[in-house]
Image: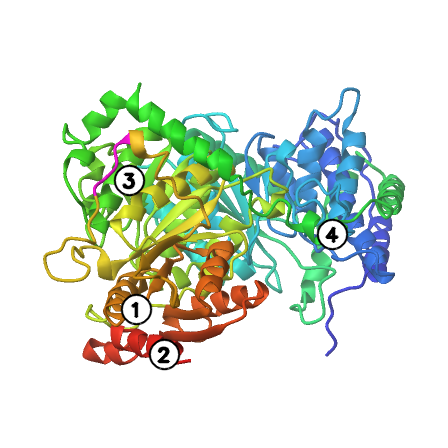
Amino acid sequence: MLNSVTTPQSLDERFRDAVSALRPPESGRAPGDPVRDGAGLTGASARELFDAQLTSRHLDLAARWLRSFNEGFHTGGSSGHEGNAAVAAALRGDDPALLHHRSAAFYCVRAANHPGEPGQDSAHRLEEAARDVLRGVVASVRDPITGGRDKIFGNPALHLVPALSAPGGHLPRAVGLAHSLARGGDTAWPDDAIVAASFGDGGAGGAGATSALHAAGRLDLAGQRVPLLLICEDNTPGEPGPDGWTGTMLRGRPGVRYTYADGCDLAAAHDAAAEAVAWVRAERRPAVLHLSTVLLLGRPGDPEPGDGLDRDPLIGTARLLVEAGLYGPDEVITRYDEIGWQVRKAAEEVLGEAKLASAGEVVASLAARRPLRVAHAVAEAAGRALGAGAPTRLRVFDGRLPEDAGPMTLAQTITAGLTDALAAHPGLLLFGPATTRGGRHGVTTGLSGVDADRVFDTPADPTTIIGLATGAGLAGLIPVPELDCLAGLHGAAEQLRAEAATMAYLSSGAYRNPLVLRVPGLAQPFGIGGHLANDNTVAALRDVPGLVVAVPARAADAAPMLRSCLAAAEADGTVSVFLEPVAVYQTRDLYQQGDSEWLAPYSAPGGWADEHVPIGRARIYGLGTAQDLTIVTYGNGVRMSLRVAAQLATEGYGARVVDLRWINPLPVADLVREATVTGRVLIVDETRRSGGVGEGVLAALVDGSFVGSVRRVAAADVPVPLGPAAQHVLVGEDAITQGAHALLAR
């Protein structure tokens, strides 16, 4: 059987035929009266929403027309979902909303109700909304949210936050935004705003929706306010209802209120949405609104709508208006044609608008890199800590300042750095699994005593953690979440890739969600072992455009690098992963037992500016003459490489060890310069040979026109096994020594 999702032509014909068959009543209702008995929607409001629904339908038709001659690059897909116009009408214009890809009617209502330019009426604003949507279709630089980079629904002026990831992937961020708005403070939204987020039934069972519903319900049951309305637009073939799979799944979520309505019935959808919005706004608690919709104008391979073709919401609204005596059938078709002409005219107008013309224009909004501003932010933080913030700093450290405590381990330095960050940044949040109890490795021990409201525990689910963080960043806070381990990141890679790191890119810089994600990771040859607790792969991190990945190898770098990440988050909205090598958390010695050379004193604020570590700058160590060999490494490899270099020095060979410190972006200038000095490069990479950091270093050397000998020591392409077997696949000092001698023999 052929796919029965209808064509634009047949959909148009069905609408005309169905409307022509309608018969008006002998006496009609007044525009100010309910559009039908028992409804809260007035006739006047129904006519306004019908205009938005008609505009939405014609936007789909125009997108397909543009695509037919290769001038449109997205075919829309809101037909059958025009009932979300009712949800937009129930919300306020300053309620932030994260919309899924079938939300043209919602967008049109929000735009029509916005004050806009002086002298504009709602009809003109509706025409401009059509242009904005079509600008996304034709990849115009005037697209109000992405600037021609993609086709999504968003507009800062309308408080529409772009939803960036796979179906349902934006919902954890919506939970995080609602949770953060409930905290109060200086945000772009009023204190009584609620967050709305829509998604389709295709994403209802995905990781994003599952985590969001779990997190919202859990927060609610814990007594925390989460003013969030999730809208599931269910276009399951047949008429989806509350007793179907989607309805049963949504209705059974603890802590989340459930409401169902027929999304193809404008009056029913409006009343259900208005009631749900009012409840969420008054109670500051989460709810889900389940709307049954239908998929029209789908793509080949989409589910067949079956009887759903008879549930076209435009026909339903036309029937509502005709039976109320507010329009005659001919008036409905005339209005349909008028708006169709306006939308087609808008499509012709946006055709000639400029497109992105260079790679530089495309990446311009990806990730700001303003090192001078970041350095200035670090210096300002130091100044506050020495001045007005000195009493607060003394209080949070309980009278025992860390600079007076003597040399510290890597873990102790990070703890002190986080404590200083809490004192310096009132909007900073620390959270993760068992954060109040120190986290998995004890690094956050005691921090909840600094500010119990800003240091809190979350579920262990990484999707939830990063979702809460991206929402908090969007609300203007600086979240510093922690994951249990590196392996946990892989299940939440979509949150980090799409919802966090590309927010500025796909909103032309209008929105940002800065965060510093702490991840204890990298492998331990003598640790617990196993592929989950001892993960050593970071390929997924280095593949995320715009993401900063910091790897402090020792205490001397940990606090300065943490301050750089926090300053970049504050100044540029940077998204960073602070990858902490678990194997050297408590390491004290470097060359021999008792030398304490892996420890370092914690600097007082007066030294923060001098020890500032810019993002993308390496640390260089020289041993002996430092002229024979360059060892490029990071993380656990730094300590091992320094030990090998010291042994080589006793043999008469001088080596320089380059600690990359940042594996995204790589410190390319530093490593090419140091490689050129010796002409021999040994890459010591504790991640896997395939997809590891070493491949990026090799590429940087080639791109930098390095002429010399290169050798690589890396972990085997296998998950880390349990127990002593781990030593056979991970990098060790013997392998580094062998690699060094092989190069020196050339």
Q: Which mark is residue 358?
A: 4
Circle 1 residue: 532
Q: Amino acid at mark 2?
A: Ala
593 sits to left or right of 132: left
Question: How far is the residue under mark 4 from the one under mark 2?
Answer: 40 Å
Classify mark 4: helix, strand or loop.
Answer: loop
- The Cα–Cα distance between marks 2 and 1, rounded to whole angstroms, is 16 Å
Asked whether the residues under the numbered discs 4 and 2 touch, taking CB atoms below 8 Å apart as contact, a structural biologist would say: no
Mark 3–mark 1 distance (CA, rounded to whole Å): 26 Å
Whether pointer 4 and pointer 3 mark residues with C-beta atoms closer than 8 Å, the reply is: no
**Foreground label between 2 and 1:** 2
Residue 143 screen position, x and y as percent = 73, 43
Q: Depth check: give the residue in front, 198 or 492.
A: 492
204 lies above or below 226 = below
Q: Main secondary structure of the magenta part?
A: loop
Looking at marks 4 and 3 on the same chain, the residue that comes earlier in the sequence is marked by: 4
Horizontal and vertical percent position of residue 147: 70, 44
Residue 252 visible to the viewer: no
Q: Are the residues flagged by discs 2 and 1 in contact, CB closer than 8 Å?
A: no
Q: For the residue labelled by badge 2, is the local secondary structure a helix, a strand or a loop?
A: loop
Which of disc 1 and disc 3 is earlier in sequence? 3
Q: Which mark is residue 716?
A: 2
> Is residue 520 among what the camera can see?
yes
Which region of the structure is painted magenta? 601-605
Residue plotted at (75% across, 30% down): 29
Reading the image, the residue beneath label 3 is 418
Q: From mark 4 to mark 3, how far is it between C-alphas?
A: 41 Å
